[in-house]
Image (tube, rainbow, N blue to C red):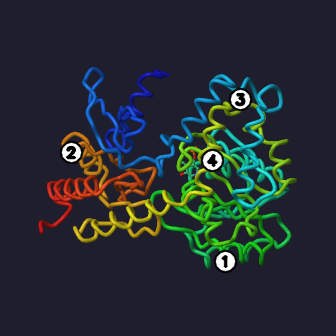
Amino acid sequence: MDYETFFSEQINQLKAEGRYRIFTKIKRDPGNFPKAFYYASPNSKPRDITVWCSNDYLGMGQHPSVLTAMKNALDHYGAGSGGTRNIAGNHYLLSELEEELASLHQKENGLLFSSGYVSNEAALGTLIRLLPNCVVYSDALNHASIIAAIRSSGAEKHIFRHNDVDHLQQLLGRTDKNRPKIIVFESVYSMDGDIAPISALCDLADQYNALTYLDEVHAVGMYGMHGGGISEEENLTSRLTIIEGTLGKAFGTMGGYITGSKTLIDVIRSYAPGFIFTTSLPPVIAAGALAAIRYLKHDHHLRIMQKNIVHQVKTKFIEAGLPLIPSTSHIVPLKIGDPIKCKKLADALLNDHGIYVQPINYPTVPRGTERLRITPTPLHTDFMINQLVDALIFEYQKLSLLKAA
Ligand code: PLP
């Protein structure tokens, strides 16, 4: 086989479909977020831009409490963790962080992983494999990491229509009552910004004796009195078997975790290869995440400001006739419906207006629903919002995606 030709063909196929991804080279500027610098080409001078697509949803990646904690941890504990948790890398800060996460989600215990992706793949995959003859029920829009966990387990799976409780009930009703079952869903869906009917899903879990696995990656830090996510906001934590989250988005650092009962965490800790056979998170990261979680547990103003700014952005988009995809969360998607135009529009925003928004194309979203995904933060100003709206109107009109006013 001519491997190089084969690889080129694969790439050319992506290019032909308009979904070849190009990294946008930026330099973040702590203290000035959401401002950053953009490098249009390798040797070009950095240009000033406003970021509207960061998952550092609250700007905690530059928060003084987080930076101070990380600088101190670096000075005190060095760069890395020194190994896997079982062999040499069980720094006390990791245990402290797990206790904090368990308390955040009102669970007995927590367990850390290298990322949110790894936590889903390792924890969910292991749970499915451990339960004999397990059947999995998964929302149609669940994240790639959940799909990977289910697929690699080889277990029987049923995909229920997105947020469709009746469909899930039909599927559950067809399965032997005595087989172990897991219902897997997210709270905030990151591409549409809608929210799962968690309570109704838990009712079904009770009725059919199923475990529940909730991914709160796009909600932790931002929802609930203490940032425990939608399950905290809706007072449902006790009804969920596992609550999973990330430290990489609203908590501003990186890493993933699950929380649950003592026994359940112990079994995942003891059986999941994706936990056992990999170097643990560095103490620096644990210190930063701890500072972010503790800050957001007791300080509400960033959450409140984020809600206000999200509301302002959505209102201005609607007033301008921009095609807002209905969203009930902090995620603001704008429909384009064509991969080439989506990329073109995002390129124009960046190059001509200094506004950074990533085009979201297939396979991240279904073909024909290509979109811009905008994530307002508490740090975006009125000036930035107006600049964004004006630039969007101009570029949507240029591509005939918006009727001229
Ligand atoms: N779960 C969901 C729903 C996600 O959208 C993502 C990433 O965006 C992940 C898990 C993975 O989280 P992380 O970025 O920490 O790996």
Q: Nearer the viewer, residue 398 or 247?
A: 247
- State how far apart marks 4 and 2 are (Cα): 38 Å
- State how far apart marks 3 and 2 are (Cα): 42 Å
Q: Identify the image quadrant of residue 136.
A: bottom right
- Viewed as shown, does residue 287 lie left or right of 98? left
The amino acid beneath tag 4 is Ala
Residue identified by numbered label 4: 148
Q: Is residue 78 above or below residue 159?
A: above
- State how far apart marks 1 and 3 are (Cα): 43 Å
Q: Residues within 10 Å of mark 2 (few under 14, many from 20)?
A: some
Looking at the image, the residue that sits furthest to the left is 404
Quick one: label 4 or label 2, which is nearer the N terminus? 4
Q: Element at badge 2?
A: helix
The amino acid beneath tag 2 is His
- State how far apart marks 4 and 1 are (Cα): 24 Å
The amino acid beneath tag 1 is Gln
Q: Is residue 314 visible?
A: yes
Q: Element at badge 4?
A: helix
Camera-nearest label, 1 or 3: 3
The amino acid beneath tag 3 is Thr
Proximity of marks 3 and 2: CB atoms separated by less than 8 Å: no
- Residue 170: which disc? 1
Residue identified by numbered label 3: 279
Kindly identify the residue that appears in the image at 28 percent across and 28 percent down: 46
Q: Element at badge 1?
A: helix
Q: Nearer the viewer, residue 312 or 399?
A: 312
Instruction: Point out residue 255 in the picture as x, y percentages from the top left corner.
Output: 62, 41
Proximity of marks 4 and 1: CB atoms separated by less than 8 Å: no
- Viewed as shown, does residue 185 lie left or right of 23? right
Quick one: label 1 or label 2, which is nearer the N terminus? 1
Quick one: label 1 or label 3, which is nearer the N terminus? 1
Q: Identify the image quadrant of residue 205.
A: bottom right
